[in-house]
Amino acid sequence: MGFPDINGKTRVCGLFGFPVEHSFSPAMHNAAFQNRGLNWAYLPFAVHPDNLVKAVQGIPSLNLAGVNITVPHKQRVIPLLDEVEPTAAKIGAVNTIVNSDGKLMGYNTDGAGFIRSLAEEASFQPRDQRVLLIGAGGAARAVAFSLALSGCKAIYFTNRTTETARELAKEINLNCGTTVEVLSWGLKLPAEKVAEVDLVVQTTSLGMWPHTQAAPEFPFAALHPGQVVCDLIYTPRQTVFLQQASARGIVILNGLGMLLYQGVLAFELWTGQRAPVEVMKETLERQLIDSKLKESKL
Ligand code: NAP
């Protein structure tokens, strides 16, 4: 929706983060609203951490329909909400708020978006599967809880800082009952465990633009066709990690699907309508190409 379409009846939602300038979400959601003929608009709000409380209080005051929450507010926003959906509470992070008649409801569509992207783009269902997660940061948390709550049989963790992986593994086991194990980092990862899993998810920031040549060390020779390897990074679209997995004939998936489906789910929570997935996907693809062009001019 462009400026001339905005009128007195426009419903407003948006993104609270710091920074927000590089986000693809405004373009993705506004294209979706336009496609569905909805008089809605999605705006970026650069909310400094010192202003988070006032910004969240502003959601009902300004009658915003809802907002997405991004770095660095996903954890700190939780005590400011009226209700938090159980999965988001377990993950300990909220990325979507719905203003339901003045009540603020918190959701986490990152993890559910990841699960949906696995289903849509790799026909992968987590139930009874074994998964290896590389990394134990915020994204790994959302992915691990969502996999565990989707019925995964076992989750193996490996992280540069072993203690962080141990804490996350313990929480997953306590909350979801899933079998967990923390494995050695890098080339010390046991090859038999790598061969045993159905899915490998690379969740560290290693390899993300502009450090595109970086990748976690990994015993790639232990991978075999039939497994799925995913990297949550989408800039570049194919990290060095994914390239090495692909060279072994493995089905690979980047993080664009997770970004897309977290947006799809947020759209559906706010509007109560089915999201135009293809339109949102095309918009993201275009945004990626545009940002590439800008990068190449830097
Ligand atoms: P985070 O909370 O800061 O966690 C970073 C993780 O990367 C930790 O496990 C950290 O290990 C590891 N790491 C960082 N630098 C490393 C290095 N030099 N060597 C080895 N390990 C290193 O970040 P996050 O929010 O989880 O994000 C992680 C990645 O996921 C980013 O690339 C982000 O863009 C991507 N992501 C994608 C989506 C999507 O929609 N596709 C959504 C969220 C995040 P330590 O514990 O040892 O520090």
Image (cartoon, rainbow, N blue to C red):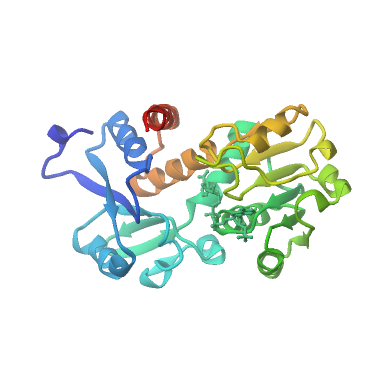
Q: Quadrant of residue 241?
A: top right
Query: Hey, which residue is sitting farthest front in the picture?
Result: 298
What residue is shown at x 74% (from left), y 50% (from top)? 132
Q: Which of 256 and 98 is in front in this view?
A: 256
What residue is shown at x 67% (from left), y 69% (from top)? 167
Q: Is residue 226 above or below residue 135?
A: above
Query: Hey, which residue is sitting farthest bottom in the picture?
Result: 79
Query: For the image shown, how many numbered marks are present on the structure?
Result: 0
Asked whether residue 84 is in view, the answer is yes
What residue is shown at x 72% (from left), y 33% (from top)? 244
Q: Which of 67 and 297 is in front in this view?
A: 297
Q: Quadrant of residue 222?
A: top right
Asked whether residue 123 is in view, the answer is no
The percent position of residue 34, horizontal first and vertical second, equals 28, 31
The quarter of the rendered structure image containing the C terminus is top left
Q: Is residue 59 left or right of residue 226?
A: left
The percent position of residue 140, horizontal first and vertical second, equals 61, 55
Q: Is residue 13 left or right of residue 188?
A: left
What residue is shown at x 32% (from left), y 32% (from top)? 31
The percent position of residue 26, horizontal first and vertical second, equals 32, 41
Q: In this view, does 70 lie above or below 21?
A: below
The quarter of the rendered structure image containing the N terminus is top left
The percent position of residue 251, horizontal first and vertical second, equals 70, 30
